[in-house]
Image (tube, rainbow, N blue to C red):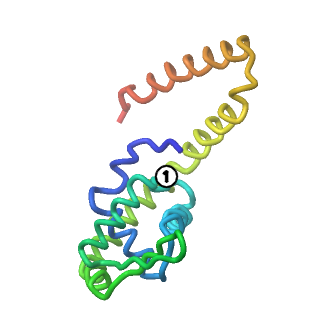
Amino acid sequence: MFLPRRRALFRRGILRHLILRTLAKGPMHGYEVIRSLSEEFGGFYRPSAGSVYPLLRALEGEGYMVVEEEGDKKIYSITSKGREFLKKNEEKVKDLIEKGRSFLQEKRGLNREIRNLTSLIIAHYRDLTPEKDKKIFQILKEARRKITDIVFEEDAS
């Protein structure tokens, strides 16, 4: 998924709060944490496994959560220390989450079209003939130029 300014959407450290808030709902596997966060933001924000799993380990190391082995999977649960940390930062987290949701809501249509276009191209990528590949390339190149003009045009206000 492509989100403009995605890194700016949630300030540094907010993902740890989101993870703890998610685990406050109940114990989960790492993938369930990712899926829950994606669902919470309507699919417009989905943290990567590469950002979630290191944070899960760090949160465990800080005593904010515990891990139990269930076969070959790990189940993560928030601790009382984690709940205290979450409660202490509750207002800050609510404000940041609301700002993120507001941003995503404003960009909903644009994000959907970007995802749809990307999905269409990826789904048919292998089947593109050299001629179709060339046509799509030209369309995307022209679209990028036009979008660049729009992005950098001066506001009349």
Q: Is residue 106 above or below residue 141?
A: below
As drawn, is 87 to the left or to the right of 4?
A: left
Helix, strand or loop under label 1:
helix
Q: Residue at x 28, y 66 (%)?
A: 58
Which residue is at the front of the view, 82 or 74?
74
Q: Is residue 126 above or below residue 70?
A: above
Q: Neighbour class for label 1 at 10 Å: few (<14), some, many (≥20)?
A: few
Q: Is residue 62 above or below residue 108?
A: below
**Label 1 is placed on what type of residue?**
Glu
Which residue is at the front of the view, 116 or 148?
116
Viewport quadrant of the C terminus: top left
As drawn, is 45 to the left or to the right of 79?
A: right
What is the residue that sits farthest to the front in this orientation?
Answer: 71
| Position in image of residue 138 (x %, y %) | 61, 14
| Position in image of residue 89 (x %, y %) | 26, 76
| Position in image of residue 119 (x %, y %) | 65, 39
The number of numbered badges drawn on the structure is 1
Q: Residue at x 24, y 81 (%)?
A: 88
Q: Residue at x 37, y 32 (%)?
A: 155
Which residue is at the front of the view, 97 or 127?
127
As drawn, is 108 to the left or to the right of 103?
A: right
Which residue is at the front of the view, 62 or 22?
62
Give the quarter of the image for residue 123. top right
Q: Is residue 157 above or below residue 84?
A: above
| Position in image of residue 87 (x %, y %) | 29, 83
Q: Residue at x 45, y 53 (%)?
A: 48
Give the quarter of the image for residue 68. bottom left
Which residue is tagged 1? 106
